[in-house]
Image: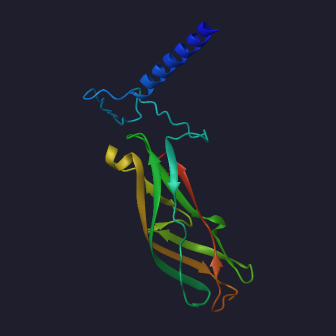
């Protein structure tokens, strides 16, 4: 009986010593070293001349239309059958691109070339809409509001490329003289990104 008690006590003492050694483990002084991290961002060009962009892939991340202006706000007075308005903007349009040599362009257009009178739902035809002096409506209008630089560099054609939207003008018809003071009109500008210089 005494021998059994002795063995159990010895085991308890050894377990306590082992636990004490684990708790007292500490960092070894002056034994710290570091490895620097260096990441080089390279152009997405493997030298074959083949652009890896697949414009038909909705999940591609090579060329993206990141942001477009939130809204364009105009104010105008009643002017008769043809109404003209101009506005200043501080909005930007942003495109992401990962390849220096890649061509791209953004085309904008007035959806259906129409404005809607909120009060009556009447449609008014837009005959001109200009963004930064670029015409979006009518025969011969390219609608290109942003595009890759002619002389492309990493600085001007990779990463997020921003185009400032500053000057706006619109002309629309009110042939039936529907407008009254206090009316609000709504319309939409759509933007499409192309991997070509001429949005075609």
Q: Is residue 134 left or right of residue 149?
A: right
Residue at image position (39%, 45%) is 158
Q: Is residue 118 above or below residue 12?
A: below
Q: Is residue 162 above or below residue 130?
A: above
Left or right of 179, for residue 96: left
Name, please, the residue furthest toward the front. 2
Q: Tell which of 27 and 126 is nearer to you.
A: 27
22 or 66: which is nearer to us?
22
What residue is drawn where x is 54% and y is 18%? 12
Q: Where in the figure is residue 132, as x and y percent of width and height?
A: 43, 68
7 shown above or below 166: above
Q: Which residue is most to the left?
A: 30
Residue 107 higher or lower than 138, as above or below: above
Position of residue 120 measured from the top left corner of the image (x, y, whole percent): 75, 83
- How far across and how far down the image is residue 62, in percent? 49, 40
Residue 83, by quadrant, is bottom right
* Residue ID at (54%, 77%): 73
Identify which residue is drawn at 59% across, 91% down: 78
Report if residue 195 is visible in the image. no
Q: Position of residue 124 (x, y in %)?
A: 67, 77
């Amino acid at each position: 009986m005494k021998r059994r008690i002795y063995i159990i006590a010895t085991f308890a003492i050894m377990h306590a010593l082992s636990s004490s050694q684990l708790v007292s483990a500490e960092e070894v002084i002056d034994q710290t070293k570091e490895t620097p991290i260096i990441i080089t961002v390279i152009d997405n060009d493997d030298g074959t001349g083949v652009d890896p962009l697949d414009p038909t892939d909705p999940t591609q991340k090579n060329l993206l239309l990141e942001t477009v202006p939130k809204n364009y706000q105009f104010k105008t007075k009643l002017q008769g059958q043809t109404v003209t308005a101009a506005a200043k903007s501080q909005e930007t349009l942003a495109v992401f691109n990962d390849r220096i040599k890649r061509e791209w362009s953004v085309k904008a257009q007035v959806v259906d070339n129409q404005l809607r009178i909120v009060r009556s739902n009447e449609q008014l035809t837009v005959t001109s809409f200009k963004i930064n002096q670029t015409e979006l409506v009518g025969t011969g209008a390219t609608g290109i509001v942003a595009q890759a630089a002619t002389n492309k560099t990493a600085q001007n054609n990779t990463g997020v490329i921003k185009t400032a939207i500053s000057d706006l003008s619109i002309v629309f018809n009110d042939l039936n003289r529907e407008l009254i003071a206090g009316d609000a009109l709504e319309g939409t500008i759509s933007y499409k990104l192309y991997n070509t210089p001429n949005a075609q």
